[in-house]
Image (cartoon, grey):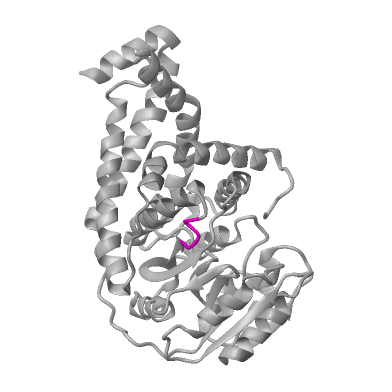
Amino acid sequence: MAEPAWIDDLTTSFGAPAAWIIVSLVAYLPGYVVALMAMSLILDRQPPLRVLDPTSPLTIIVAARNEQGGIAETIRCLARTDYAGPVRVILADNGSTDDTARFAQIAATEVGINLTIVREERAGKSNALNTALTHVTTEYVITVDADTLLHRDALRRLISRLESAPPNTVAVAGTVLVRNSRTNLLTRMQEWDYYLGIAGVKRMQGLFQSTLVAQGAFSVYLTERVRDIGGWPDAIGEDIVMTWKLLEQGDRVIFEPTAVAFTDAPGALKHFMRQRARWARGMLEGIRAVPPWRQTRKLAGLIAGINLLIPLLDIGYALIWLPGLVLFVFFGDPTIVSLWALTVIPATLIIYGGLRHYQRTRVFGPLGLFVRKNLRGYLLFLLVYQVFCSIASLVGYAQFLGGTARRWK
């Protein structure tokens, strides 16, 4: 078999301990994650919605800082949804120095939105969200980022899933996709990441009713459960830590693929790298605040425990697999990366193919959306995108371990 020969070669070159570390990081761990993803997606079957036209009162919090350029469009988009129940919108103005609040009020008046403006001078999104939370009187609270536009069906489908879910479901994450994918090649690659990668991971986690991030960009929560855990924590990934705290109580957090919103992805590489570094750092903050072994539900602990492997996967990819691939492809040296390790690639392609079919037929089809042609972005997403993500993640891990100052932008 190729595997023992590969390990023998590595042992000769690096010694037995290093050989097994390399094999684990570039083959066993990626293989385990790919297999778990494949199994989960095969088993995933969204239960039918029991509540099709909910009318429960909602409060939507839009946290914003210096968003005068896009806040009006976000407010107008909220007014265009087909949700039948009463909707109140709170703008959590986090110390804006521009006309964000005024532009939001003008737009709300134009479209008849019930808008309350709450100003919070303390820096940090969590402070703005928690101040707004004190003004929420409805059973459900939804967070929407200031640069995020909701699909017409988004609110109805999100609340339908919540009201059709098991009794101890306390949050539902919606689907967030890229709306500015035509900006450049970087946003074209991110379009596929959101469309396939992130959505696929959320489907896997949702199967176990343990979606690990009810993202602040578009999710619904039970208001009282958020208050019970003290609201959004002071963390760079406040939505990650809050979701894990909800799961820690034994509650369920699920995912609704057809509740779709569109957001702006970073168009500059430095902004993208900073964003992914923040996400990586936020994940470690979540692990520190709520370790997987503290999860009440075993399935939630299992899914959360996968995050312990993510830094190892990034280390293996950026520092071992990628240099090994260069040696194998350009110099014919299979010492680090062999044909056996490369079997992860076709397996991943098969998974992405299945995800593309699901998204096209089960998500975009019912919503009347169409997948735009983006072949170059797809190829680059497959070939080079992970390089940037893993390197940025390593930076985020280093920032966490070094305790450097947080940067939200």
At x 36%, y 21%, the residue is 337
Left or right of 349? Residue 76 is: right
- Residue 57 vs 160, above or below: the answer is below
At which x and y percent is residue 349? Answer: 28, 42
Left or right of 305? Residue 134 is: right
At x 48%, y 42%, the residue is 308
Q: In front here: 34 or 97?
A: 97
| Magenta part of the chain | 178-182
Q: Quadrant of the N terminus?
A: top left
Q: Is residue 148 visible?
A: yes
Q: In front here: 356 or 369?
A: 369
- Residue 188 vs 154, above or below: the answer is above
Q: In front here: 221 or 409?
A: 409
Q: Main secondary structure of the magenta part?
A: loop
At which x and y percent is residue 251? Answer: 44, 68
Left or right of 73? Residue 407 is: right
- Residue 229 vs 268, above or below: the answer is below
At x 38%, y 53%, the residue is 201
